[in-house]
Each structure stands twice: as structure tokens, then as C-alpha cells.
């Protein structure tokens, strides 16, 4: 393990409130969370809202909701406060200006009010000359530079063209030449800093030890390293996360490629434990075959040195499979009450509307016999309606069933009558799974039918659903009256159709 458990690591999730957090970028929250918490360190939530043009109202609330749902609690940051308040960058203007003045004093930043038209003409000229555009090649002469910086005038970094070598905890040793260093903007005309400058100041002020972010920032590294140097500060360790790739093709998963909001998966019936588990293991493994991890297990096993340095493909089928495993795990380890609590919350209800009229105990009985077939909690809505309302009789379903196809309608009707009479003879107080199983066995013997034939017939007659849990369990939950009345209704539908 590369993470030393003796030091307390400080990491941050630093989203810009420009929209929802999607599957492609949420690992930038999960991994720093794990890295900080496994060393008893500090996980910070900082909102990078200095780009007012891209600001989306409500996005911060969505970020907070997503982190809370995933169980990624932060020790410092918005809502909870901390020693480095405020945690909205837009409220930290004075701090950035103080650092900007240090750079001006050291001769490493200059005010520059060159208009965007002039900048465009520089670009065009360079493109005509077929040389790469770099602003520093057009930097105003010392003599023409404004001597004092008035807010309202953009401030640029005065770069030094040089080569850089640095280490990335995931990407290894990296190196660039002088051609990538440029005079980037530090403070914009609106007085707010760019991401490029603000994150450096904040990570330093907040004592961040590891910057965990997407690889898209790698190309700007030489400029960042130049700024650290000019400020005379040490940089944190860099942990660059490869892209999450779309399910199809070889491209990065982005909103345009259908990357859904993480929180939408909650409405779809994904458990937060499963989501955390799936995403943590997307591009990381501990070298074993283990697939299900609780948050505590992730905290024990996670290590930076096993983060893959190539893209990991998002696979919703695997997510659904893992969610199914988590549903079973909660039921098996914590019992039906715990799983039931997940199915009803103030903002999502995964039950069919007709379930409202039934007592909780009945819903729990239903859940106990269907939970092992669920991939998501919203499957409940689809799989359980016949427990709450009489199904629509669909004779086609009987005719098309592969086990019943060869059986005439008359035979189906007679068999249903036989079943109904047999079950009718079971006293109400004996209507329990075990007795029902015995009755079904007797019916098998008496009818001489194969289990698949007889049981498919009964199952369809009482549920008209494509599948149901084991028949004796389904009938036990439905109760005697409902079971018999459905058998009889199916019987009369068949007979009247003859
Ligand atoms: N504000 C940046 C973003 O939302 C964060 C990058 C970083 O973590 O430094 O992409």
C-alpha cells in the first residue's frame, strides 16, 4: 500500500456548480473520500463557483444531495464549515487577490487589458505562420505594461518557458517541454480567479495533501507547476483519474453520451451502497476476486497504487447485478425490516399505488418472497401488482405458454377446477406454505401432470404475470380467498371462451 496510515491525508472534492454529478465524474469524490478517511484525515467539500457564466442555480444542492446519498460525509466545507472558511470560491476573492499581489510583487504576474479582438488577431497571425499560438509570444513589452493592477483588469501569469518533470501517483513519472508554458489568466475582468489559479491557492490554504481529479487537467500541469514555483509553495501529490468510458465505443462517458445524474439512479431503485461499491471498483481493484465491498471494507482495502491508469468502461448491466446482490445482502444480514425501510422513503416509494391500501406486514411478506429476484427496488413496482389487485385475465398467456400449449382449453379448465376444489378443502387456519406444498404434491400425483405443466397453469391463473415466486409461497401470501377466487375467475374465463 502506498498510503501511509501514519499521516493524515487531506483531500477535497471541488465541483463546479454547473449541473448534476454524473457517473463519469463522481469518482473524483469517492476516491478522495476514501484516501482521506482511511488515514483519519480530512475530506473537504469546496464549491468552485468562479465561472459565473456556467453557474447553474440548484446545482450545489444536487451535489450535496448526491454526496449525502452515497454516504460521503465531509469534515470541512460548505454546510459544515471549518478552519478555512468560506468554502465557496466566489466568497474568497480577497484571499486570491492577496496571492495575486504576491505574484505581481515578485514580477510574475501582470495586468493585461488586451481586448479579445486583439487576442484573436494574434491567434490568426500565428495560425497563418503555422506556429503554435502562445500568448507569451505576444506579451506586452515591460515598458508598455501597466504598473499597478486595478481590479477590473485581467491579471496574467508571467510564465517562464521551461521543462517540467513530475510524478503522478496514477500516471507515473511525467515530463513536458517549454512549449506548453504560457501566460494564463489568473484573475478575470470580473475580479474572480480562474480555476487555474484558485485551486492552487485553495489547496495550499486548506493544506490539501492529494489532489484527486480527472486526467483532463494533466495538460495544464506545466502552468500549474509554474505557479507553485512562482509562489514559492510546495504542491500536493497529484492523483489523476483516467476517464470513465461510455458503454459503447472508445470515448469518455459524458452527459452527451447519456451519462445520467448519479441521483437519478436512486429513483431507479439503486441502493447507495451498490452505487458506491460499483463506482469504487470501476478502475480500481484490490487484486482479489472480491466484488462486494461495504464502505468500511473499501476504507480498509483501497489504495492509490491500485487505481488503473487506463479508462474503465461503465457497464450498467454489472451495476444492476451488483445492486441485486446488495438487495440480498441487506435482506440476509439485516432482515426484512431493514430492506423494507429502503423501499419507502419520503421522496421515493417503490411500491405499486394499490399497495397503499395494505398493511405494512403484508408488504413485508410480499418483499420476503420476491426480494431475491430484484435487480433494483423499482422492480418491486413491476413484479408485485398482483399481490395488491386482481390481475387482468389474459387467456393468450395460457395459450402461448410453452408447457400449456399442448393442453386443450377444456383440460385446462378441468384441471383448474380440480385445484380449486382441493385447495378449498384446506381450512383457513392451515393455509400455510408447507401445507400448500403438500396439497400441490397431491394434485401432481392425482392429475398425472408434469410439475411444469400444472404449476405454470396455477401460477398464471393466480397472477397473470410472466413469473412469480414459488407457488406455495405466493399462495400463502395471497391468502385462501384471493387464491380460490382467482382460480375460479380464470376457470370461468376459460369455460366461457370455449
Ligand atoms: N472545479 C473542477 C471541476 O468541477 C474541479 C477540478 C479539481 O478537482 O481540481 O471540474
Image (cartoon, rainbow, N blue to C red):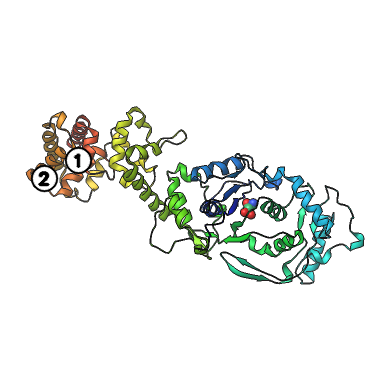
> Residue farthest to the right?
143
Q: Is residue 77 left or right of residue 106?
A: left
Viewer-closest of 94 and 82: 82
Decide if residue 172 is in sight here.
yes
Q: Position of residue 77 (x, y in %)?
A: 62, 44
Task: For mark 2, give the secondary structure.
Answer: helix
Q: Is residue 168 left or right of residue 52?
A: left
Q: Position of residue 135 (x, y in %)?
A: 79, 63
Q: CA distance from mark 2 to mark 1?
A: 13 Å
Q: Which residue is mark 1?
A: 472
Camera-nearest label, 2 or 1 = 1
**Disc nearer the start of the sequence (2/1):** 2
Q: Position of residue 23 (x, y in %)?
A: 52, 52
Task: For mark 1, give the secondary structure.
Answer: helix
Viewer-closest of 273 and 299: 299
Query: Residue 291 appears in which quarter of the rendering?
Result: bottom left
Q: Is residue 291 left or right of residue 100?
A: left
Q: Which residue is mark 2?
A: 444
For the point 80% across and 65% down, the residue is: 136
Amino acid at each position: 500500500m502506498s498510503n501511509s496510515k501514519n499521516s493524515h491525508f487531506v483531500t477535497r472534492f471541488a465541483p463546479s456548480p454547473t449541473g448534476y454529478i454524473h457517473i463519469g465524474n463522481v469518482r473524483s469524490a469517492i476516491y478522495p473520500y476514501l484516501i482521506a478517511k482511511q488515514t483519519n484525515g480530512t475530506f473537504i467539500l469546496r464549491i468552485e463557483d468562479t465561472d459565473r457564466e456556467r453557474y447553474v442555480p440548484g446545482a450545489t444542492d444536487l451535489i450535496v444531495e448526491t454526496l449525502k446519498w452515497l454516504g460521503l460525509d465531509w469534515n470541512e466545507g460548505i454546510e459544515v464549515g471549518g478552519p478555512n472558511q468560506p468554502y465557496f470560491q466566489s466568497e474568497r476573492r480577497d484571499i486570491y487577490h492577496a496571492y495575486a499581489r504576491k505574484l505581481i510583487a515578485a514580477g510574475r504576474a501582470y495586468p493585461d487589458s488586451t481586448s479579445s479582438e486583439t487576442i484573436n488577431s494574434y491567434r490568426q497571425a500565428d495560425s497563418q505562420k503555422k506556429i503554435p499560438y502562445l500568448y507569451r509570444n505576444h506579451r506586452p513589452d515591460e515598458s508598455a505594461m501597466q504598473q499597478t493592477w486595478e481590479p477590473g483588469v485581467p491579471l496574467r501569469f508571467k510564465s517562464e518557458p521551461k521543462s517540467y518533470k513530475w510524478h503522478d501517483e496514477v500516471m507515473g513519472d511525467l515530463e513536458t517541454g517549454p512549449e506548453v508554458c504560457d501566460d494564463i489568466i489568473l484573475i478575470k475582468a470580473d475580479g474572480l480567479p480562474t480555476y487555474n489559479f484558485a485551486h492552487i491557492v485553495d489547496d495550499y490554504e486548506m493544506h490539501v495533501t492529494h489532489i484527486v481529479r480527472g486526467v483532463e487537467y494533466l495538460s495544464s500541469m506545466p502552468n500549474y507547476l509554474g505557479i507553485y514555483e512562482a509562489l514559492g509553495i510546495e504542491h500536493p501529490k497529484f492523483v489523476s483519474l483516467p476517464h470513465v468510458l461510455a458503454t459503447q465505443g472508445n470515448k469518455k462517458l459524458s452527459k452527451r453520451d447519456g451519462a445520467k445524474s448519479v441521483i437519478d439512479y436512486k429513483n431507479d431503485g439503486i441502493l447507495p451502497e451498490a452505487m458506491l461499491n460499483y463506482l469504487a471498483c470501476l478502475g480500481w481493484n484490490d487484486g482479489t476476486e472480491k466484488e462486494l465491498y461495504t464502505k468500511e471494507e473499501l476504507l480498509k482495502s483501497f489504495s492509490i497504487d491500485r487505481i488503473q491508469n487506463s479508462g474503465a468502461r461503465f457497464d450498467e448491466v454489472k451495476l444492476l447485478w451488483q445492486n441485486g446482490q446488495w438487495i440480498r445482502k441487506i435482506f440476509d444480514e439485516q432482515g426484512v425490516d431493514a430492506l423494507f425501510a429502503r423501499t419507502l422513503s419520503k421522496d421515493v416509494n417503490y411500491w405499486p399505488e394499490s399497495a397503499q391500501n395494505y398493511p405494512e406486514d403484508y408488504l413485508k411478506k410480499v418483499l420476503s418472497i420476491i426480494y431475491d429476484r430484484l435487480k433494483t427496488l423499482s422492480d418491486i413496482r413491476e413484479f408485485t401488482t398482483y399481490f395488491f389487485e386482481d390481475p387482468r385475465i389474459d387467456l393468450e398467456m395460457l395459450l402461448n405458454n410453452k408447457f400449456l400449449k399442448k393442453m386443450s382449453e377444456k383440460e385446462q379448465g378441468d384441471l383448474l377446477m380440480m385445484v380449486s376444489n382441493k385447495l378449498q378443502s384446506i381450512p383457513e387456519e392451515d393455509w400455510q406454505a408447507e401445507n400448500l406444498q403438500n396439497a400441490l404434491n397431491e394434485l401432481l400425483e392425482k392429475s398425472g401432470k408434469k410439475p411444469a405443466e400444472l404449476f405454470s397453469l396455477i401460477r398464471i391463473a393466480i397472477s397473470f404475470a410472466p413469473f412469480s415466486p414459488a407457488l406455495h409461497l405466493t399462495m400463502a401470501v395471497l391468502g385462501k380467498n384471493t387464491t380460490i377466487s382467482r382460480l375460479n375467475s380464470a376457470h370461468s374465463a376459460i369455460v366461457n371462451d370455449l
